[in-house]
Structures are given as C-alpha cells and as structure tokens.
Image (spheres, rainbow, N blue to C red):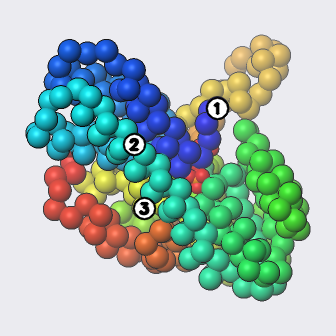
Amino acid sequence: MRIRGAGRIARASVKALEDFGTALDVKSGTEFINKVKEAGEFLKNARPTAVSLPNAVNYVLTNLDKECQCTVDVPVLKDSLKKYCEKFITRSESAIERIGLIGSNRIQDGDIILTHCNSESAIAIILAAFKQKKNIKVFCTETRPKMQGLLTSSKLAKEGIDVTLIIDSAARFYMNRVNVVVVGADAISVNGAIVNKIGTSMMALAAKESRSRFIVAAESYKISPKTFYGELIPIEERPHEEVVTKDWYAMNECVKIANPAFDITPPEYIDLIVTEYGVFPPQAILLLFKEIYGSIDIINQ
Ligand code: RI2
C-alpha cells in the first residue's frame, strides 16, 4: 500500500522487474529468463484486484519470450528487458495524458464534479478541463479507510481548483448538485463492469438516481483478459487494522470486521469509459479488448 493507484502499481512492478533482471548474475539466457519469470509471478500476486499489474508484467514477459527465440545472450536479453519495461512505462504515462485530453471534452464549463479515491486518470481529466479554463468545482470523498481522497483534494486545490472534501457517506447528500462523477478503475471486465475503490458503486447508484453523468477514466491495460473466459475479478480483502484501532479491537474481539478494498459497478450505471484510444460506452469495451488481444491465446497469460 506504499504505492497506490492501479497505474502506479503497474509501472512500479515493471520497474522492479527491470531492476531485478539487471542485477542478475547468471550464466545462461535460459537461467535469466526463468529467474525473471519467477520474479514476474511473485510480483503478479502482490495485489489481486489491480489487473494492470499482471497485464504489465505479462506484456514484458511475452515480449522477452519472443526475443529469447532469437538469442540466449544474457547482455542482449538484459537490454531487451530494459527496453520493454521502459516502453510500458512510457506508454502508461502517455496514456494518462491522452485520457486527460480526451475525457476533458466531456467536462463542460460550470460542471460540478465528484471524484472518489485517488486516480491519476480521473485527476488528469479534471486538470485538463481546468487548464482549458473551464469553470469547475470538485467534491472529493475522503475514501475511508485509507483516506486517499485527502491526496486528491490537496493536489487539485494546489492547482487552484475549487475543492470541497466530504465524508464518503455525504456523497448522495451532495449528488443533486453534481453534474458528473469521474472515477478511475482498478480493473474493467469485458462486459463493461468496472472494479474500483470500495464505495464507487454506491456513488454510481446515487448518480443514476440524480441523473448525473458517470465517467470512468482507465488505461486499456486495466481490461481483464481472464473475464473473457468467465473468470471473476477477485476483490482484495484488507486487514481490519485499517478500519479500527488496535485498542478498540482488543476490547471488542468478538466483532467481525470486513474490509473489502474494491467493489463492482455494473455497466448500466456507467455512461462512458475514457481510454487512451477514445471513449467507449461500457458495453462496447469488448471491441477495444479484441483490438488489443486479437487472436492471441490469452488464457495462459
Ligand atoms: P489510477 C486505486 O486503488 C483506486 O481504486 C483508484 O480509483 C484506482 O486505483 C485507479 O487509479 P488503490 O491502489 O490507476 O488505491 O487511475 O487501492 O491511478
């Protein structure tokens, strides 16, 4: 949890893989590939919900495997590993910038926006709209239990945006003033549902009721290939220490505490998913998925 945000997690993972591979002292290309793959598997299991993590690692490993068919020279393979890790990081950063620009077309002058948690992509849209001199106001939810909304509100306020921090349970109270909700995603299912920080689906419900638009900002590597084969995206359950203090828990050990970090917002509650390739109604995200994966046998990834 020292690195937060699905995109940041993906970039940090490939950077870790690059550092690990560069430092390896091995005798053969096969040994190099096996050790990098082993490290990749370890990284993939670090956070179960953010599918950007396995997608990023798989992107590097798949390309490294292809290189391995041409050479087993360790220094060459080390260069390739570095090249693909850096390529992923650059593409990820430029994807966020593009999402900001594309998504800002859907923000109008005078809009009152609500955002939840701390998403780089959602923030990119808000900042791009503000830089286009659109007169916007933003409500940020504090996002219990880790309070990432404090990061978002502080960043937006420092940029000069009119920001109000609210507690999560005040979202519906303010929703009738909000024109548009902009959130990020940790994962996108091929049916157009999104998985994002716990509380997102409640905000989507409230937005639908008050006829506020609901926009999801997410890079294409948030699409979960496994959902194509019917697998469900696992929801990370986090420790109870995030919810209550140790002292309180010591006095109330018979109280069960549940702390799911994410929830699922069905496609019916989402107006648009903004990606670096353009804007998709949630039901059309399958088109982007097919464009990216084509006929590759993705089930083994
Ligand atoms: P970006 C975060 O998860 C939040 O749920 C956020 O909405 C989502 O990742 C996407 O963030 P966590 O890592 O990738 O804080 O858009 O648990 O930055």
- Check the image and name the residue furthest to the left: 69
Quadrant of the rendered structure where residue 173 is?
bottom right
Residue 57: x and y in percent read: 36, 40
Q: What type is the residue that disc 3 sits on?
A: Ser
* Mark 3, residue position: 220
* Mark 1, residue position: 2
Q: Which mark is residue 85?
A: 2
Kind of element beneath mark 3: helix
> Which residue is at a point 55% across and 69% down the rendered structure image?
99
> Which residue is at a point 42% across and 67% down the rendered structure image?
192
Q: Quick check: marks 1 and 2 in contact, CB under 8 Å?
A: no
Q: What type is the residue that disc 2 sits on?
A: Cys
Q: Quadrant of the C terminus?
A: top left
Kind of element beneath mark 2: helix
Of labels 3 and 2, the one closer to you: 2
- Give whichever of discs 1 and 3 has the lower sequence position: 1
